[in-house]
Structure formats: C-alpha cells, structure tokens
Amino acid sequence: MSDPILVTGAAGFIGYSVSKKLLEQGERVFGIDNLNDYYEVSLKEARLENLRPHNAFEFMKIDISDKDAMEKMWAEKGPFKRVIHLAAQAGVRYSLTNPHAYTASNTTGHLVVMDLCRHTEGFEHFVYASSSSVYGANTKLPFSVKDPVTQPISLYAATKRSVELLSESYSRLYRMPQTGLRFFTVYGPWGRPDMALFIFTKAILEGTPLPVFGGGEMKRDFTFIDDIVSGVIASLHAVPDEEVPHRIFNLGNTRSEELMDFIRLIEDATGKKAEIEFQGMQKGDVQQTYADITESRELLGYNPQTTIEEGVPKFVEWYRNYYGI
Ligand SMILES: NC(=O)c1ccc[n+]([C@@H]2O[C@H](COP(=O)([O-])OP(=O)(O)OC[C@H]3O[C@@H](n4cnc5c(N)ncnc54)[C@H](O)[C@@H]3O)[C@@H](O)[C@H]2O)c1
C-alpha cells in the first residue's frame, strides 16, 4: 500500500468527498480538520462517520494555523509526501464580518502546511484549493487562468489569490511541485449549508421566503461534486515538472447558468413553489462566473459530466434523506 495522503479539511464538503473516493480507490488517507462551527458541526461529524469504517482512514482534529501542533502531528504521523489542502475558512459573505478568520485559516494555515511539505525529503506534490472568486471584478468571460487576477472584491478572494502567490514563491525558491485549483461553485450531496442550493432547498421545503440576491440576475458556473472530485484526484496524479513546478487550473462546469433556472430545478425536484424575495446585490458577490477549462482538459484530462438538470435532483434527494423532510 502506498504512503497515506494528507487531506486537510477532511470533514468539509469537498475534503470529505475527495477522501471517500481516494479510499474507494485503495489509497490511505490521513484526514485533519478543526471541526469549527462556521456551520453545523453535526454535518461534519456525520461525514467523518462515513469515512471511519475504512481501515485505511485516520483522522485527527487539529488547527492548521497552529504551527507547533502541526509540526508535532507531522513528526508523529508523517512525513506526508502527497498533500491535498482543502481546509479553509470558506464563504464570501462571512468574510465581510469576520476577516481575521480568513487570514488565520487561509493565509497562515496555507503557509504552515506548505512549509511542512517543503521541509519533507522527497516531497512529491502539494495540491491546494483556490477559488473562482480570484477573478473578482474581471469582466472578460469565460474566466481563463491566463487572465490577470488583481481585482479581488472580497477579503475571501484576496486570501485565495494570496495563497496562490505564496505557492508560486515556494515553487520558484525550492522547486516544490504544486497545483492550485480554482473551484467554481461546487454543489451536490453532503454540500455546505451556507451555499445557495442548500439555503434554497431548505427554504422551499420548509415553505419559508427565499432571499434571492442580485435581483435574481446572477449567473454561476455550478460544478457537481463528483466532477470536482475527479478533477482533484486527476491533479494529484499530474505532478508539474516545469522549471517552476506550479500550475493553476479552473475546475468549473464551463456553463454559466441563470440563478433563476437553478431555482426552477429545485422547485421541480421538491415539487414545491419557491416564495421568492428579491434583494439587492450583496457586497463581495460577483455578477457572473464562467470557467474556461482548456488547460484542465488538456493537462488533467478533466471533463465535467454533470448538468444541473442531473445534479440538482441528486442534492435534493440527499437533503430529504439526511434531514428526513
Ligand atoms: N464549495 C465551493 O463551492 C468552493 C468554491 C471555491 C473554493 N472552495 C474552496 O475549497 C475548499 C473546500 O471547501 P468546502 O466547500 O469543502 O468548504 P467546507 O467549509 O465544507 O470545508 C472546509 C473544512 O476546513 C475546515 N477548516 C477550516 N479552517 C480550518 C483550520 N484552521 N484548521 C483545520 N481545519 C479547518 C473546516 O472545519 C471545514 O470542515 C476551501 O479551501 C474553499 O475555500 C470551495
């Protein structure tokens, strides 16, 4: 059996889904997470419960920004030569009121993990999460990894762009192989309660008003979790070998969908009508996202398969089972 892969944020939506797939593929996974209460901890625990039966899974509760604790963990449980770093303080809106949570978990946390990797002999690959939000105020569509990204419109986006630059410096300094993944609005079973699909489904099923920001005019490139998992695992195996071994990819569905069409699919899947309350644009939100995935197709063989017509009902089915509603 190969060395364990360290997955940070293993109790989170994407970290859990990636860990599950890696275990199914016969890999060993060492998962870490601080299980913070940004959203319901019971959901994070329930995800972990699904991973625990696997003999090849081990978990430790730890904060990635705690350098001393992380060094101790690495010395006792590592060293790890392959790392998938997904732990972060996510969410654009929360960053308006809690900016410090973002610098601690995202920027400091990234440095702590990356620096441990760099001091590991024979280190192979550091794959980390970035975000479509780095495109910020860009208006050229679709968003390409070749576009300049210097106009973040939220602190969350700024921390994600910052970690890309931290990684670039380490790849230049130490030839450390790294891959940054800009995820585009990921959704699906075991998803995050602070995200649109979750909030909309809950409101529609409970018959409460549904706040729709941006007057319903927003467009998003919604990416189904299984496609993201395939992209993350493909990127783990595609180790960059350039002079500066650092690549950045878009992982989107490469379709920009109207928010209102998305809501209609939730109505269809639940069999209930939404009581929509249109509201203005929220600070920090971008009007549209749309991924150009040319490089991801070429170098990772990434090929998203799931339309929102297929993906939304899968989420609604999971939600109804999980919450018994
Ligand atoms: N879901 C999306 O649409 C999306 C889009 C773009 C980028 N991302 C990025 O992908 C990654 C995973 O996102 P997700 O949707 O699974 O979010 P999530 O919140 O479900 O998962 C993140 C996990 O990290 C953990 N965590 C946070 N701070 C930590 C710390 N200091 N130490 C240890 N653990 C910590 C949390 O407890 C959580 O379980 C994040 O980096 C996020 O910014 C997600």
Image (tube, helix red, strand yellow):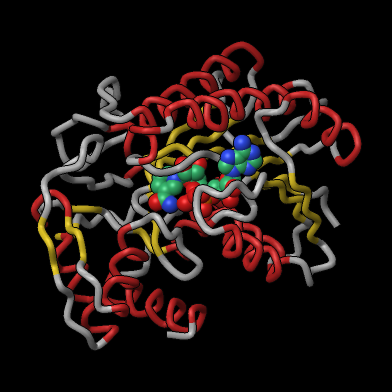
The quadrant holding residue 194 is bottom left
Q: Nearer the viewer, residue 296 or 224?
A: 224
**Quarter location, residue 139:** top left
Residue at 34% x, 40% y is 92
Foreground residue among 169 and 315? 315
> Is 254 or 278 nearer to us in this picture?
278
State how many labels appear: 0
| Residue farthest right in this picture | 76
Q: Is residue 209 above or below residue 268?
A: above
Residue 83, picture quadrant: top right
Which quadrant is home to the N terminus? bottom right
Residue 284: horizontal and vertical position, in percent? 25, 35
Find residue 98 and report its horizontal and vertical position in percent.
Answer: 43, 32
**Residue 291 percent coordinates (x, y):** 28, 46
Residue 238 shows in the view: no
Residue furthest bottom in the image: 271
**Left or right of 225 on screen, residue 30:** right
Residue drawn at (55%, 38%) of the image: 128
Instruction: Indicate left or right for 54 with 18 as reference.
Output: right
In the image, what residue occupies the spot 51% across and 31% down?
Answer: 101
Residue 222 x %, y %? 30, 58
User: In the orientation shown, which residue stands out farthest toward the front?
Assistant: 208
Q: Is residue 192 visible?
A: yes
Q: Is residue 107 above or below residue 18?
A: above
